[in-house]
Amino acid sequence: MSGVWRDLWGLGRFRLEHLDRPAWRRFWLALLGLGLAFFLALYSTALHEAGYAAGAAAVAAVALLIAAFVAVKVVPYLARRTAFERWWAKIDYEFTHEGLVYFLIIMVIAIAGLNTGNNLLFIILASLLAGILVSGILSAIVLAELEMDFVLPEHLFAGQPVVARLAVENRKWVFPSFSITLAARRRDGASRKGAVAANRPILDAPVYLPHIPHRASVTQHVELVFPRRGRYAQEGFRASTKFPFGLLRKAREVASRQEVLVLPAVRPMAELSNVLPLLGGEMESFAKGRGHDLYSIRDYRESDTARHVDWKATAKAQQLKVREFTREDERRLALVFDAAVHTLDERRLAQFEKGVSFCASLAWHFASTDTQIQFITHAFETPMAPAAEVLYPILEHLALVEPLRGELNPPSALEARLANAAHPAAFHIIVTSRPRGSIPTSLWGASYMVFAESL
């Protein structure tokens, strides 16, 4: 089989795959029934003319019953199936501005031909209508047998540009595809309000591909920026083309469900140094041991090594003195995100988003310093572990966290949550969107508070 026949076969197979077979079966049975009723009606007329009035009446009644059966049983079924409308939704036609002008010219020539009876005008009219027919056939061939693959990086952050790879494969044997525009297929229904609405499309701008050779694939790199954290999803792509004449834009939808989770924006810690001036000093705990910083100078003992003898202090005191060094304790902290918001107005919600970003930035910073960390919110917690091991579970939870009403989640509930879930030896850092005066003294004194209103 040649390549041309393969392409035509592929186009025909695409049409057959979208047929509503039960509806077409009933349609053909309806045509057969109506044809039989028409034949019986003609036969009843012949019987009546031949003088067989009773037989003509009986045959006419049978014809009428067959037609009524088709009208009652088949027509409502086909109306409910609406096969034509669903087929039309799969192959979408839209007139362009050039196409509208072209259509007006056709109307003018048609009216002129009907008024004058000029055969030349009818020939021109037929040529113009053939142009629309040829445009529809060629655009259908261009859109047939296309497969798409959309690849995104594993981790996405809000506000950070990323490069995605969009690959389109033309599986036709002979015909190439020209002037393809790819856009996101949006979900039906309105997106819900909030920071984590899942109805936001991934591909926010169309991608244009001028030429895709037959039996080949074309890759287009697309730069994307996700403005907010949360879940982004789209049901597939909408491939459209105005090839060859630009009279019609023909489009079909390609099902390829995509869903990604965009993590909160992570800011450099240099930008946050003015917010946490005392955090480093409160977290560090030092004790005597093996380290690099000098802890004290004491008298020499028999078990001490000669490497630690301080000769200057020995000469001054006229007896052996050794140096003791500090040992930095393994740092353990509980990073707590308080999702309660005093009021759900725009200003408080904006502060809430800043708190989410700040908490994500802290988790990222502690992952780079090998800190033992535990993350706690109202409905999620991680075990005490190296921050690098629990970093992405923390970021994924922060990507989906939503504000809670403050009156339903008082500070006492947060304090009880810490008492039950926090590691007993952990240093607490609490990021909250509550106002300063609403934090009880017991919670304030046992933790380092970061208020979102100061970020």
Image (tube, rainbow, N blue to C red):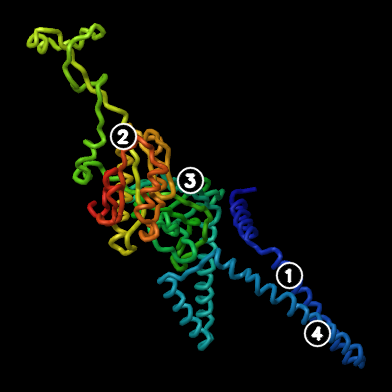
Label 2: element kind: helix
Place residue 96 in its image quadrant: bottom left
Q: Can residue 334 be seen in this view?
A: yes
Foreground pick, 29 / 385: 385
Nearer to the camera, 111 or 202: 202
Marks 1 and 3, the one that precedes in the sequence:
1
**Disc nearest the viewer among 2 and 1:** 2
Q: Classify mark 1: helix, strand or loop.
A: helix
The amino acid at mark 2 is: Ser
x, y (%) of residue 317?
A: 9, 11
CA distance separating discs 1 and 3: 41 Å
N-terminal-most mark, 2 or 4: 4
Q: How crowded is mark 4: few (under 14 residues within 10 Å), some or many (20 or more)?
A: some
Residue 301 spot, x, y in % from top left: 22, 9
Q: Which of marks 1 and 3 is in front?
A: 1
Q: Residue at x 29, y 47 (%)?
A: 442
Q: What amino acid is labelled 4 in the image? A: Leu
Residue 226 visible:
no
Q: Give the numbered dot on residue 368.
A: 2
Q: Give the amino acid type for the residue marked by disc 3 in the picture.
A: Ser
Read off the residue under disc 3: 217
User: Which residue is the site of mark 1?
Assistant: 26
What amino acid is at disc 1? Answer: Arg
Q: Is mark 4 on a helix, strand or loop?
A: helix
Query: Do labels 1 and 3 touch, CB within 8 Å?
Result: no
Q: Pointer 4: what residue?
A: 64
Decide: marks 2, 4 in contact (CB < 8 A)?
no
* Among numbered discs 1 and 4, the one appearing first in the sequence: 1
- Nearer-the-camera pick, 57 or 306: 306
| Residue in the picture at 39% in, 55% down | 402
